[in-house]
C-alpha cells in the first residue's frame, strides 16, 4: 500500500543478481505508475522506463526535449509504487559530464535501480530511426566515467548504450562496447542490432550483461526471450509496447463514441471498475483508514 515495501537499495541488489543469473530478465516498459502493477502480476522481473515514452506522454517527439527534472520525477513515481527494480533511459545524460554526474545522483535519489546513458549527439533521436550521429570515443567514455564516479550506491547500475551500429558496422559497435566497459559500464545496451548473430557477437565481445531492445516497428526482428537467452542476452526490454497498446485502445473507443454516440459497444473491452479497484488496492487503503479512524472524537456529538 502507498509505496513499495522494498528499498531502492534492495531493488538494485536484485537487479545485479538477476543480470548475472542463468535466466534472461524481462522488463516491459511502464506506461504509468499503475501499469507497474500489471507488470508485476504477470511475473515479470522488472520495469523499464523509456525516454521516448516519457517524451511522447508529454506530446513531444523523442528528440531530447525532455529535461532531467521531468524524467527523474516521472521515473521516481513509477519506481516507488513497485517492488520490482526499475531501469530508466537517461538519454545522453542531459548534458556535459558534470550534468551526467548530476543525472545519476538525481536518479539514485528518485529510487531507480539503474539507468542507461547513450553515445549519441545531443539532441538525440530515437534509436531505431535513420540519420543518427554518435559522439567520438573520448566523449562517450567520459560520460560513463562521470556516471560511475558520481553514484553513491555502488549497486546502482550504469548501463552504456551505443548507437554506433546505426551508422557503422558491427565491428565498430563491438569496439565501442569494449571501450565503454573499460570506462566503467556495468552493462551494455547495443541498439538496433540487425539479427541474433549480432547479439551473439556482442556477447562474445564483452564480459558484462547485455540488453536487447525488442521494440515494435524497429530495426530488429521481435525475437522471443528464449531466442535471446540462447545467444547470451541477459535482459530484454519492451519499451513502448504498453503505451502503443493503450493508445490503440483509446483511439478505438473514441471512434466508437464518435460513431455511435455512446461507448456501450466498447465496454466489454474495458478494465472493469472492480478490477481497477483491485489494482489500486482500494480494500487495503480502506482497512488501513478504518484502523486509524476507528475512535470517536470526544465532544463531537454534544
Image (tube, rainbow, N blue to C red):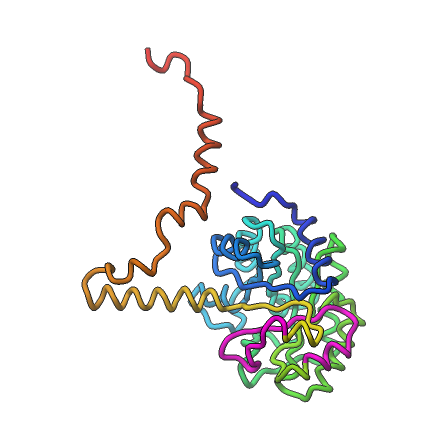
Residue 144 appears at what percent x and percent y? 73, 68
Name of the residue lying farthest toward the right: 182
What residue is shown at x 72% (from left), y 79% (from top)? Answer: 202
Residue 123 appears at what percent x and percent y? 57, 74
Name of the residue lying farthest toward the bottom: 169
Q: How many marks?
A: 0
Q: Nearer the viewer, residue 229 or 76?
A: 229
Q: Is residue 209 magenta?
A: yes
Residue 73 appears at what percent x and percent y? 54, 54
Which quadrant does the C terminus fall into?
top left
204 left or right of 216 in image: right
What residue is shown at x 57% (from left), y 53% (from top)? Answer: 79
Q: Is residue 267 magenta?
A: no
Residue 128 in which image quadrant: bottom right
106 left or right of 73 in image: right
92 left or right of 13 in image: left
Residue 97 in which image quadrant: bottom right
Residue 245 appears at what percent x and percent y? 42, 67
Name of the residue lying farthest toward the left: 261
What residue is shown at x 73% (from left), y 87% (from top)? Answer: 171
Q: Nearer the viewer, residue 15 or 8?
A: 15
What span is in magenta?
Answer: 199-226
What residue is shown at x 61% (from left), y 58% (from top)? Answer: 45
Amino acid at each position: 500500500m502507498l509505496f513499495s515495501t522494498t528499498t531502492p537499495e534492495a531493488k538494485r541488489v536484485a537487479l545485479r543478481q538477476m543480470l548475472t543469473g542463468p535466466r534472461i530478465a524481462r522488463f516491459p516498459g511502464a506506461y504509468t505508475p499503475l501499469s507497474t502493477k500489471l507488470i508485476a502480476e504477470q511475473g515479470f522481473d522488472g520495469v523499464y522506463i523509456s525516454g521516448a515514452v516519457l517524451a511522447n506522454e508529454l506530446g513531444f517527439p523523442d528528440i531530447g526535449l525532455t529535461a532531467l527534472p521531468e524524467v527523474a520525477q516521472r521515473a521516481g513515481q513509477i519506481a516507488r509504487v513497485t517492488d520490482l527494480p526499475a531501469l530508466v533511459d537517461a538519454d545522453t545524460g542531459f548534458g556535459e559530464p558534470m550534468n551526467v554526474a548530476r543525472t545519476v545522483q538525481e536518479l539514485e535519489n528518485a529510487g531507480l535501480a539503474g539507468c542507461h546513458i547513450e553515445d549519441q549527439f545531443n539532441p538525440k533521436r530515437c534509436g531505431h530511426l535513420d540519420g543518427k550521429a554518435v559522439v567520438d570515443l573520448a566523449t562517450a567514455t567520459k560520460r560513463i566515467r562521470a556516471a560511475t564516479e558520481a553514484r553513491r550506491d555502488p549497486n546502482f547500475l550504469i548501463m552504456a548504450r551505443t548507437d554506433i551500429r546505426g551508422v557503422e558496422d558491427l565491428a565498430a559497435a563491438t569496439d565501442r562496447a569494449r571501450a565503454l566497459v573499460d570506462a566503467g559500464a556495468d552493462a551494455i545496451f547495443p541498439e538496433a542490432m540487425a539479427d541474433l548473430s549480432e547479439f551473439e557477437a556482442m556477447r562474445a565481445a564483452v564480459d558484462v550483461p547485455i540488453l536487447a531492445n525488442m521494440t515494435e516497428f524497429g530495426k530488429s526482428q521481435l525475437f522471443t526471450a528464449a531466442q535471446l537467452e540462447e545467444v547470451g542476452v541477459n535482459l530484454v526490454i519492451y519499451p513502448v509496447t504498453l503505451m502503443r497498446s493503450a493508445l490503440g485502445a483509446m483511439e478505438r473507443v473514441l471512434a466508437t463514441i464518435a460513431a455511435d454516440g455512446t461507448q456501450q459497444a466498447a465496454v466489454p473491452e474495458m478494465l472493469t471498475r472492480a478490477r481497477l479497484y483491485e489494482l489500486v488496492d482500494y480494500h487495503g487503503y480502506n482497512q488501513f483508514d478504518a484502523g486509524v479512524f476507528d475512535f470517536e472524537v470526544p465532544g463531537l456529538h454534544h
